[in-house]
Image: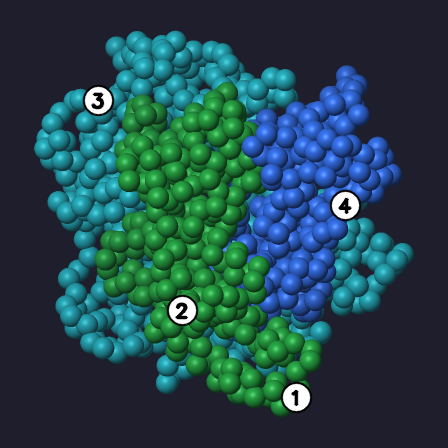
Amino acid sequence: MKVHAQRLVAARLGLAVLTLFIVSMVVFGITGLLPGDAAQQALGQAATPEQVTALRHQFGLDQPAVTRYLQWLVHVVTGNFGTSLSNNLPVSELIATRLPNSLVLAGLTALVSVPLALVIGIASAMYRGSLVDRVLNVLTLSTVAVPEFLVATIAVLIFAVKLRWLPALSYLSDVSSFGGLLRTYAMPVMTLCCVIVAQMARMTRAAVLDQLNASYVEMALLKGATPMRVVLRHVLPNTIGPIANAVALSLSYLFGGVVIVESIFNYPGLASLMVDAVTNRDMPLVQGCVMVFCAAYLALVLIADLAQIVSNPRLRQR
Amino acid sequence: MTTNMIEVKGLRVIAGVAPDPVVEIVKGVDFTVKKGEVLALIGESGSGKTTIALALLGYARGGCAIAGGSVKIGDTDVLSLDARGRRALRSRTVAYVAQSASAGFNPARTIMDQVTEPALLHKLMTAAAAREKAVVLFRSLALPNPETIGDRYPHQVSGGQLQRLMAAMALITDPAVVVFDEPTTALDVTTQIEVLAAFKGVVRELGTTAVYVSHDLAVVAQMADRIVVLNGGRVRENGTTAQVLDAPVDEYTRQLLAATRRPEAELTMPDEARDVPLLEIRNLSAGYGRIDAHGVPAVRVLDDVSLKIERGCTLGVIGESGSGKTTLARVIAGLVDRAHGEVLLDGKPLPAKLSERTLEQYRRVQIVFQNADTALNPSRTIADILARPMNFYHGLRGAPAQKRMLELLDLVKLPASIAKRQPGGLSGGQKQRVNLARALAAKPELILCDEVTSALDTVVGAAILDLLAELRRELNVSYMFISHDISTVRAICDEVIVLYAGQCVEAGQRDALSHPPYHPYTGLLVDSVPALRPGWLDSRRAMALGTLPVLGPESDVRELCSFRSRCAARIDGKCNVTPPARKTLPSGAEILCHHSADDLARMQSMETVTA
Amino acid sequence: MNRNVSSHATTMLYEQPPADAPQEQAPVVVKRGALKRLVDRFSVLGLIGLFIVVFWLAVAFVGPVIAPYKGGAFTSTEVFGSYSPAHLLGTDYLGRDMLSRILYGTQYTVGLALASTVAASVIGTFFGLIAAVSGRWVDEVLSRLFDALISIPSKILALVVIAAFGSSIPMLMMVAALAYIPGAFRISRSLAVNIMTLEYVQVAKARGEKLFYIARVEVLPNMIHPMLADFGLRFVFIVLLLSGLSFLGLGVQPPNADWGSLVRENIGGLSEGAPAVLMPAVAIATLTVGVNLLIDSLRRHGARSHGGAQ
């Protein structure tokens, strides 16, 4: 990569780190500073002022906000997220047990959805205006808007209740065999895939169409190339960047969907851990989960941006 | 017996698909082209010339369809071929050179890859043979570094070179017919001449039949043996070049010729010698990027420019792309910051920042832009657009405002009914007139015209120029007329300055452009403008395709002559070492050059004599 | 589900209308029926979307009035009952009529989402305009701030705020707006910045106009059309967010119930395939899909007839 591109990449990385800092400030601000006095809440209405003050001192709440934030930040960066209020275990330990599960789920979803979406997206772009394209357009348009729990409930209804092929809940103990793996993950992955595939296919189609409308495509046709050749040799090399961008962005939507899916299927992942933490108002756990999620999300978006930068021939060759 | 290479009969092309309204864009066109001949299709935008050119390849753009007629290339009836047959025809028998080379090349692949593609597609030769042939073509098209230029990517190569590479791509299969679709329209005039010379040379050498599409009669006069004039999808005139230029039969052709051959307006001297010019600029520098210790920005767009405009006079600013002429207008209007220098309006300094100017200062200087489409707010009516400056500057409202608006519309020769419409429905010429009316609504003293006719058709643009001249006579308003087209500037300006790479290389009365001596760049400009007589290009070939004198390594001085990289008169040891001195030519013009006025006169007259 | 338009996407969620799309029909001598004209303007799918949207909007207002069973009346002994003439959409886990429950819940789903969307769009557009029209510093600060907010997936952000502040109705509205203001900001800023480069804005500046005038008269009217499309999109996101939160038990709290809560409280009927679980989810789907169809058809047909930024 040439110098100019390197500088751009470095700038993007720097920006990502800066954004992560601001995000941490926002998160800490919302969870740590605003909700009012944690000490008061812990002790209840009947506590005497001295008890409250003592507990506040113990929690470190009487220090200025900036100090508290910086202390918290240092802890986070070193991996110490504090202790969970609901079960007194270190937050990092809880996260460490649950995170791999979520990663597996996300990974499987990506594995299934990306090829499918690419095929649908590229095919609809190539045959734009045809019946296939219009039907696919309506389908993806509708699927994108459908709530995950509807897809999940319908899937459970069909596969678990009526057909009895798959279990309604996911028991991770079952993953020893490949068949077991399939059965456990089939429905959560299917639910997640539904919306992600639709979103990814739409963005892929737009990216490919963008290139198909470029003037050099007309020139290629006037050279006597067949439409297939035009797509394969001329358009696709130019679309790799935009498509990678589309894929990375669509995958980032997993972060929202996984919350619902893990809850509805009782899947022991990071998102369901966070939902429990929120229900119990377990602040340290909430903070920990959020930071992990945001870091991962930012990483994915960063990859999307970098794909755009790197694939631009002007930057590669200069 | 020379047979007809191309025969077009009754060609009809429509746009739109039923049940939506269907418009005929080509309404029954006939013409023939003999083998080895060059035919020009000339017309303005919307005349259908590109559509006809594409139909020769059996291609219609999206939304259009070839509805009738026949196109025969040699013995093949193109329109009766199926898709496969047409693909076999394209680039093998008929090749196409597109208008915008940067759009015609795929940015992600090398040039050699794309130039050899037609040969490989039609399986005419091996890849190695195709490469060799490509290099030979590069050489005959006078491209620099023919052996290595193919390894570059399109964005690393200049516009003029790309256009020639596109011609190489078309010629690599030795097609019987080559269609050139406005290939030089997007190029500077000094680049255009090289490209035209290269095209003409190679077409003649190979004996290819060519169809040349353009809107510029002068260019066409150089390239074509026969001319077909198109208007509104119909053929208006069809004849040899000489006949069409000297004795046109059709009224539209005459209009076109009249618009191209504009007579020069009379010089108006300022009626009294005023000591204070209306606008004076001293040592103006502007640019982008960080400003160093000397007050010079990292990217210099304007460098030490000075000029004067007297009241009631018109100053023409001539420059090509990258000369900084648009920035000059914007700096005066306050839209772009200046790094250094002064702008004086009526002797008083004009602040650089818009926020520091007074209402009067805003009013006295108005700007009219090139692109009429984006210069009018699409969500407002013409009446609203004109009412605002009247209200803003003069507090005119209600009935007096209405009256004044009708006056303004009358001034720019627009019907009163146009006031209720929105800009979206107006033609390019009408929009430009509204632009002018908006500028006039403020009762300005100086109007900055930034390439106001460049985006318009020749005939429409000529009408705007007439309007500008008339307004000047009636209102005694001054213009700064910015353009890249010397003939336009010569038509309405009293004084001119020539900008090159941000520097003012020549400044003087308009007559200074009529005959040598001039600054070498001015000389190149003047000589590059195609004349309306055939044979001009051939006489210029030596100049167009000649090599420049060798120049050694350069010294580190900042103010070296900006034209040294392209100057045919550059002197090794002078031009690359010391900055040029300011000289006054006999015509009164001031230039920056190392050569004396006599030397220049000699060199430049010699060129015209040997022409 | 976080479907924000990301800060970094150059590939927009929107597609450009195909270049060869047919022109709008000019009024011809033959007088065509009003219905036919509507179909031309909206396309069949768009009309379906329009109908659905209008239907639910109407129900949001008159739902409680037309519901067959008022309030939380227990009208049946059968729990998770199936479709029947007395209970068109079955009964819920307590024996209440699902149709009435859904009709009552429409206010919460549609009303809350609409209020949040209006807030998000208006605030986002406002800041976007400011960022585009003001100088570099203001633009940078605002952009960094909203960039950071966008970097938190919307569901996660909502969860964080709810963890801190609870889930009362005003808080839900604020949370939904907060999660989607950055997206509206991003789009409106990008539209405004593009418009600012056009010459008619330059002319206005050179004329000496103040920034407020330029924003109000030159920029805003030419942005409205795309922003309306964005408004619809945002509405869909917010409906999904709020119903998702209710489904998790963190949204609208009992005794109030929006459609998401209805799914949650009836989840026990899933193994029987009871309509009580399915119908509220289907209702949400019809609303969001309808809006999507409507916006899509508006975008295809409207983009051609309007000038300004696209």
In the picture, one chain is green; tell me its letter: A
- Residue A36, position in %: x, y? 63, 76
In whole angstroms, how far apart are the C-alphas of marks 1 and 4? 44 Å
What is the distance, in whole Å, between disc 4 and disc 2 at their CAs? 43 Å
Residue C291 falls left or right of residue A84: right
Q: Against B304, is A208 above or below? A: above
Asked if residue B311 can be seen in this view, the reply is yes
Q: What residue type is labelled 4?
A: Gln
User: Which secondary structure, mark 4?
Assistant: helix
Q: Nearer the viewer, mark 1 or mark 4?
A: 1
| Left or right: A144 as drawn, with respect to A16 | right
Q: What element carries label 2?
A: loop
Badge number at residue A49: 1
Q: Could you tell me if the residues under marks 2 and 3 are in contact, i.e. CB atoms within 8 Å? A: no
Query: Which chain is assigned cyan?
Result: B
Which residue: 32% across, 10% down?
Answer: B76
Can residue B265 be seen here? no
Q: Mark 3 points at which residue?
A: B122
Which quadrant of the rendered structure holds the N terminus of chain A?
bottom left
Between marks 4 and 2 in the image, the one whose residue lies nearer the viewer: 2
**Measured along the vertical axis of the image, is residue B531 above or below residue B307?**
above
Query: What residue sits right under mark 2 in the picture?
Result: A90
- Image quadrant where residue B501 sits: bottom left
Which residue, as the protein is rendered here, is positioned at the far right? B399
Residue at left 24%, top 60%?
Answer: A2
Characterize the local packing of mark 4: few (<14), some (14-19) or many (20 or more) Cα atoms within 10 angstroms: many
Q: How far apart are marks 2 and 3 (CA)?
A: 70 Å
Chain letter for the blue part: C
- Establish whether labels 1 and 2 are both on one chain: yes
Q: Name the residue under label 4.
A: C107
